[in-house]
Amino acid sequence: MSFSSQSAILPNAGPFALYVTFNVKSAEQQVLQQLQQLPKLVDDLNSQQADANVNVAISFSHGMWQKMNQAMPDELVPFQPLGSGEITAPATGGDILLHIHSNRHDLHFYLLRKLLLLCDGHLEILDETYGYRYLDSRDMTDFVDGTENPKDEGRKEVAIIDDGEFTGGSYVMVQRFIHNLPAWNRLSVAAQEKVIGRTKPDSIELEDVPKASHVGRVDIKEEGKGVKIVRHSLPYGSVSGDHGLLFIAYCKRVHNFTVMLESMYGATDGHSDQMLKFTKAVTGAYFFTPSQEMLSLLSVKG
């Protein structure tokens, strides 16, 4: 039997995305059955709506997976809080993560509303965030986001489990960040570049990357190889409301997320990512994204 990854993981992020974290309040098997029908609904939309290019991934937390008729994925664990004081990564949980990206913002709203109607009140939304590509793939700090993201076949190599019981699956981490742009914009461009570790106009790594810069904290090597993840992050928000970055990434190992987070939040050597003085995580969770085939076979125990 061949195993295919869910459609949202390997393509580059579309210009619009929706990220929703749910708790399942009741009727878990009914909710699961509706989630299993969602890829078919996406296929139908793609055939009916020209150039929609809708892709979807449905992922499950450690707690939710314990209720399934499958063994636990090896590295699926609850997200652990990190940091101290003003620089913290909270663990906010959730049972299910829905990630959709496409060329059409309206279709994301349509799919979510359809899912909620079919689930008949059994789902509770914990976080609903609509992301969008900003300028030439920049964060709202006006720096290019995801410069080192794997490309082409490298994305599959990094993101997708390639052997064993969970072939075709992937682990996913999500954090929503709220930016303090007034404080950020008070910095000179040179100071901002030292915080990020890259140039602002063209995203070239600085010759002398500061140890506590963002690049300095997440450019990690183990046994001579870079620790990689496949990012699907996009900015979100409005001028008058909260705005920032919805950080989401896939990887065939939770280990890669853990070492990056520990480096960013000072757990490795006491130095934290200086960018965290200007942005704050308000959500944090790990999930597992089964292959398309495993998703279709899941059922709730009992």
Image (cartoon, grey):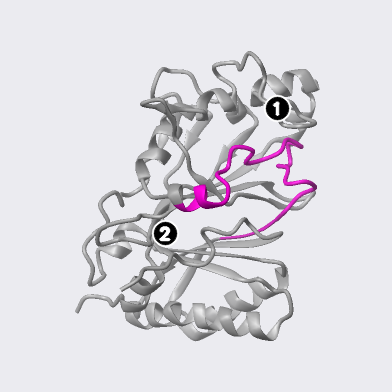
**Which residue is depicted at the point 27% across and 76% down?**
300
Q: Position of residue 29 (x, y in %)?
A: 33, 80
What are the residue bounds of the magenta stretch? 128-156
Tag 2: Cα neighbours inside 10 Å, few (<14), some, or many (≥20)? many
Q: Residue furthest top?
A: 208
Q: Earlier in the sequence, mark 2 or mark 1?
A: 2
Q: Which residue is mark 2?
A: 94
**Which residue is depicted at the point 47% across and 69% down?**
124
Q: Position of residue 171 (x, y in %)?
A: 39, 53
Could you tell whether 37 is left or right of 299 in the image?
A: right
Query: Which amino acid lies under the numbered mark 2 shown in the image of this protein?
Result: Gly
Judge depth for marks 2 and 1 and give the one in front. 1
Q: Is residue 92 visible?
A: no
**Depth check: 296 or 155 in front?**
155
Q: Is residue 146 visible?
A: yes
Could you tell whether 128 is left or right of 159 in the image?
A: right
Query: Which amino acid lies under the numbered mark 1 shown in the image of this protein?
Result: Ile
**Which residue is depicted at the point 55% across and 83% down?**
41
Q: Secondary structure at mark 1?
A: loop
Tag 1: Cα neighbours inside 10 Å, few (<14), some, or many (≥20)? few
